[in-house]
Amino acid sequence: MHIVNGKFINSEDLELETVETLRGNTIDIDPDNLTLTDSRGRVANFDLDFIDIQSAGGVIHAIDKVLLNPEM
């Protein structure tokens, strides 16, 4: 629900924007408050202990909640 294709961004490069997930949902990124907001207004905070983790498939930024399907 919160995987974004084609974005390999470190935390210092995050911008205020709305992105589309692999499942076609949208997430609003707020780098000033370090939050993600899903289409139903649920907010998840970036976990500062687990941001900018380099992996083979991209960059991982862990969050403190699970963002659910908009129908849930």
Image (tube, rainbow, N blue to C red):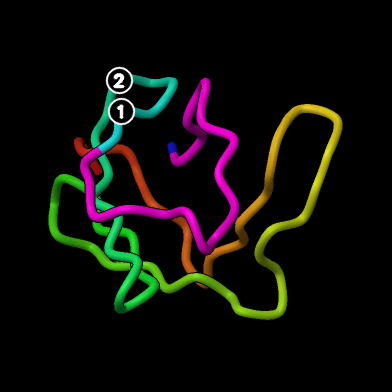
Q: How many marks?
A: 2
Image quarter (top left, top right, bottom left or bottom right) of the C terminus: top left
SS label for mark 2: loop
* 39 in magenta: no
What's the CA distance linking mark 1 and mark 2? Answer: 6 Å
Q: Residue 17's x, y, as percent? A: 22, 46
Residue occupying the far left of the picture? 40
Residue 5 relative to residue 42: left or right? right
In this view, the residue farthest toward the front is: 13
Looking at the rendered structure, the kind of residue marked 1 is Glu
Residue where numbered disc 2 is placed: 24
Residue at image position (29%, 35%) is 19
The picture places residue 45, in percent across and down from the top left corner, at: 42, 73
Q: Is residue 40 above or below residue 45?
A: above
- Residue appearing at x 47%, y 57% in the figure: 66
Q: Image check: 51 left or right of 18?
A: right
The image shows residue 69, relative to residue 45, as above or below, that is above
Specify the quadrant of the image occupied by residue 23.
top left
User: Which amino acid type is shown beneath numbered disc 2?
Assistant: Gly
Q: At numbered mark 1, what does the secondary structure look like: helix, strand or loop?
A: strand
The reply to whether discs 1 and 2 touch (Cβ–Cβ < 8 Å) is yes
Q: Position of residue 49 (x, y in %)?
A: 71, 79
In depth, the one of 37 and 16 nearer the eye is: 16
| Residue 27 as seen in the image, left or right of residue 58 | left
Q: Nearer the viewer, residue 58 or 72?
A: 58
Magenta highlight range:
2-18
Q: Which residue is pictured at 54% across the width and 61% down the height?
A: 11
> Magenta: predominant secondary structure element?
loop
Q: Is residue 15 left or right of residue 12?
A: left
Query: Disc 1 designates what residue?
Result: 20
